[in-house]
Amino acid sequence: MTERDSRRRQILDAVVGSGQLSALAFYGKGRDTDVRAESFRRMVNPLLDRGVQRLIIESRQGRDQRDRQVLIEELRRLARPQPFRYVHLPPHGDPLLWVADALAWSHSAGGTWRARIADITAAEDVSAP
């Protein structure tokens, strides 16, 4: 987020106060590609449990195929009915990607920023077994 702190607080308060969102935050130590893949693996079941119909993923030029591969493998492994659809979009491709970025930034910033989104965010360290 490149906004000033006052604007960040305003955005986050609007997101949390809307009552329309909940977020899963996955983080970890290690190679970015490994952390990203494990994050996708761990998010599939909770997304299915929440009845998610469509997952919008921020495109990472050249890495989208790996994301698709991980999602397909995990959906097959779980063999759950009604799998969700997923699509890769550029960062400006959907406003919900901006919300996800704001929440991810807040979680990684820690302290009062993380506390500000705590009511709507569940976080999991994917570097832990």
Image: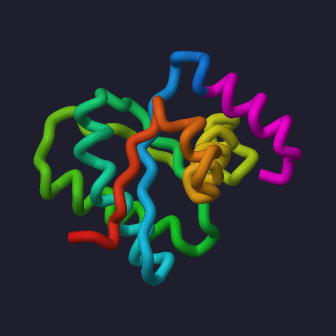
Colouring mode (rainbow / by chain / secondary structure / one colour): rainbow
* Left or right: where 121 falls relative to 2: left
Q: Is residue 56 shown above or below 51? A: below
In the rendered image, the vertical position of residue 31 relative to residue 125, given as above or below: below
The residue at the point 28 percent across, 56 percent down is 42
The residue at 69%/42% (across/down) is: 98
Percent across and percent down for residue 77 are 13, 57
Residue 55: quarter of image: top left
Residue 58 can be seen, yes or no: no
* In-front residue for pair 5/68: 5
- Answer above or below: position of 116 versus 26: above
In reply to whether residue 2 is colored magenta, the answer given is: yes
Residue visible at 29% across and 59% down in the picture: 41
Residue 24 falls in which quadrant of the image? Answer: top left
Q: Position of residue 2 (x, y in %)?
A: 84, 53
Q: Is residue 49 magenta?
A: no
Left or right: residue 79 compared with residue 53: left
Q: Quadrant of the C terminus?
A: bottom left
Name the residue rendered at 30%, 29% in the picture.
Answer: 50
Considering every residue shown, the one lying at the far bottom of the view is: 31
Residue 31: tell me if it is visible. Answer: yes
- What is the magenta range? 1-15
- Count the marks: how many? 0
Find residue 114 and report its horizontal and vertical position in percent.
56, 46
Residue 4 appears in which quarter of the rendering? top right
Predominant SS of the magenta segment: helix
Q: Is residue 15 left or right of residue 88?
A: right
Q: Nearer the viewer, residue 98 or 73?
A: 98
- In the rendered image, the residue lying farthest to the right is 4
